[in-house]
Image (cartoon, helix red, strand yellow):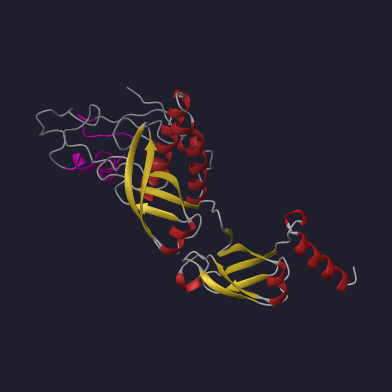
Amino acid sequence: MGVAYKDYYKLLGVERSATKDEIAKAYKKLARKYHPDLNPGDKAAEDKFKDVNEAYEVLKDDEKRRMYDQLGPNWKDGQQFTGGPGFENFNFNFNGQSFGGGVNSDFFEALFGNLGRGGGFGGQTDPFGSFGGFGGGARRPRRGSDIEAEIDITLEEARRGGTKQVTLSSGGTTSSLQITIPAGIRDGGKLRLRGKGNPGDPAGDLYLTVHYAAHPVFRVEGQDVICEVSLAPWEAVFGAKKRVPTLDGEVEMNIPAGSSSGRKLRIRGRGLGPESARGDEYVSVAVSVPSPDSLSEEQLAHWKALAELAGN
């Protein structure tokens, strides 16, 4: 029975001449849109997600894509298909010597594997035992599809690296994995876990896209990190030694005299990124001015005297 032809290019919304990067970009967009975790209970989205994954598994692989372009989506199972461009006139006669339309032995082997050469159909006890009704050999093992997911890590983990326990949910199942985070990994970097994707022979891989989680002390600009240090007015005037945070712990820093709010002081090499190209830390000065209501009468008198000396 014929199997309806699936146009993998249309499923991903790309041209037949699309590059690998264009195909991958289209797949990621659609996989995120139709992912079951984002569309709970939506059978149509689940089916679309499966179709998109099926299309990407073929089109991302040069050899599979070549075979698909020649034979359509059912080449792996050796099934008769309808609607594939350029193959409308092929007729396969498995009990005869002719396979139609100029199909040679190389073509037949590409379609059916080792069944096409020797001992394939004539010498089998059950000549129609596999490939959905054609052939007598074992099915070729099918590799499991890859999985893509996203994880958040702290800035400290990004700087130092190390191991991290993560919990992932996919298709209604939850799994816990221990992953290794390389020191200096960038925001948006990818981790590949071989064999942790969907089951198959072999199993697919798991790709994790890393994102920096929001930090209570630091903000990130490129590979640099920025924090703020608060100074009393007299510390801003006369300078001071202050303990300031870094991603490796606190350090003592000399604040120069005459530092106004907004001044940035740099600590080299205390930012993010690989050691060979690590960013810096910038400490932003913020002068803290007391409220008059918080001052004692004596303190308020001194502030008034200072104002008079300044000519105000």
In the rendered image, which quarter is residue 56 located in? top left
Residue ID at (49%, 64%): 247
Residue ID at (84%, 69%): 305
Indicate whether residue 66 is drawn in magenta: no
Residue stretch rendered in magenta on the structure: 94-117
Q: Please state which of residues 307 and 24 is positioned toward the viewer in this rendering.
A: 307
Q: Tell me the quadrant of the picture where the N terminus can be found.
A: top left
Residue 136: % across, % down: 16, 33
Indicate whether residue 97 is drawn in magenta: yes
In the image, is 147 to the left or to the right of 246? left
Q: Is residue 271 above or below residue 194?
A: below
Q: Residue furthest top?
A: 1
Residue 19: % across, % down: 50, 51
Q: Please state which of residues 108 and 255 is positioned toward the viewer in this rendering.
A: 255
In the image, is 184 to the left or to the right of 14? left
Q: Please state which of residues 13 and 94 is positioned toward the viewer in this rendering.
A: 13
Q: Residue furthest front?
A: 298
Q: Please state which of residues 283 and 195 is positioned toward the viewer in this rendering.
A: 283
In the image, is 214 to the left or to the right of 4? right
Residue 88: % across, % down: 41, 31
Q: Tell me the quadrant of the picture where the C terminus can be found.
A: bottom right
Residue ID at (32%, 43%): 176
In the rendered image, which quarter is residue 161 located in? bottom left
Q: Is residue 61 above or below residue 297?
A: above
